[in-house]
Image: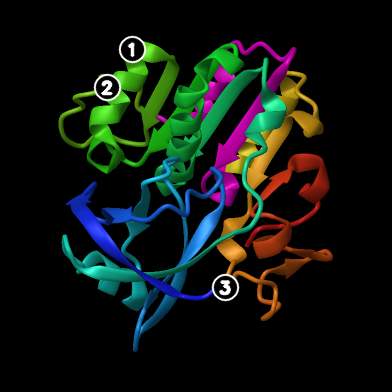
Amino acid sequence: MNLKKYKILSTSKETADDVFLRIETDINPQPGQFVQVSIPGIGEAPISTASCDENFLDLNIRVVGNVTKAIGNLKKNDYIHLRGPYGRGYPLVDFKGKNIVLIGGGCGVAPLRGVIKYLEKHRKDYDEITMFFGFRTPQDVLFKDEVAVWMKKYNFNMSVDKSPEDNPFFCPVGFVTQILDQTKIETKNTEVLLCGPPIMMDKCVEILKKKKFKDSQLWVSLERHMKCGVGKCGHCMAHGFYVCKDGPVFRYDEVKDITDE
């Protein structure tokens, strides 16, 4: 897909390191897919989508380098260049009638926000929805206003690694893997969607397998390797897979021998 220019409808700071953009476009990626975001003269970066809407696209950008810094400096009514969407997302249509468990860490919660938006639009098609989200500190929690809503609507679990200041969420202090380990989850007729740091996902998979989940019930994102987005550069190739084309979302039994580093 060719690079196109789109208008930014709004921007906001989610955390000290994260910028949230709402962009006017009808491309409406499948939750778990990504777009290539380009800043002419600087470069481009693959960004997972955080919405599910036919009229706009939400992106949460972690500012970590020159491209993402330039993206973070954009303002309302500026224009941004996108191409995509690319890749394979979470196959939510196949999960109708099932329980859904979402497990996210840090900025990995952003793609799962897109999943939540989809589930909300099709709520009657799914059974229980359970969430386990982990962040570094209360100040690093993404989508704070929405978290307050999710706490009331779903089986919501959240932790922070540490809480040096106030903890307005009154959530446990510790790793998300700890609350996952301590919580009973129905394994029958359940699909688990994971997104976050590789070490977190590896530990969560280990815990889930102890809870008798099968590899075929677990869905992980390996999007860290993506670069060109279309399988041309070979940067994301691992064990015969192009993460950008065959993923970034994989069923765990497809990629359990791949190290995402």
Alpha-carbon distance for marks 2 and 3?
A: 35 Å
Q: In which quarter of the image is residue 11?
A: bottom left
Earlier in the chain: of badge 3 and badge 1, it is 1
Instruction: Count neighbours of disc 3 (C-alpha within 10 A) and say few if under 14, some if 14 to 19, many if 20 or more.
Output: some
Instruction: Count neighbours of disc 2 (C-alpha within 10 A) and say few if under 14, some if 14 to 19, many if 20 or more.
Output: few
Q: In which quarter of the image is residue 95?
A: top right
Earlier in the chain: of badge 2 and badge 3, it is 2
- Quarter placement of the C terminus: bottom right
The residue that appears at 78% across and 50% down in the rendered structure is: 255
Alpha-carbon distance for marks 3 and 1?
A: 38 Å
**Please, which colouring scheme is shown?**
rainbow
Q: Name the amino acid type tagged 1.
A: Lys
Label 3: which residue?
227
Provide the residue span drawn in magenta: 174-200
The residue that appears at 76% across and 66% down in the rendered structure is: 238
Q: Position of residue 140 (x, y in %)?
A: 28, 43
Q: Is residue 40 visible?
A: yes
**Where 242 sits versus 16, above or below?**
below
Q: Does the magenta stretch include residue 4?
A: no
Circle 3 SS class: loop
Q: Name the amino acid type tagged 2.
A: Ala
State yes or no: discs 2 and 3 in contact (Cβ < 8 Å).
Answer: no
30 to the left or right of 236? left
Label 1: which residue?
152
- In this view, the residue in front, 73 or 79, is 79
73 to the left or right of 211? left
- In this view, the residue in front, 43 or 123, is 123
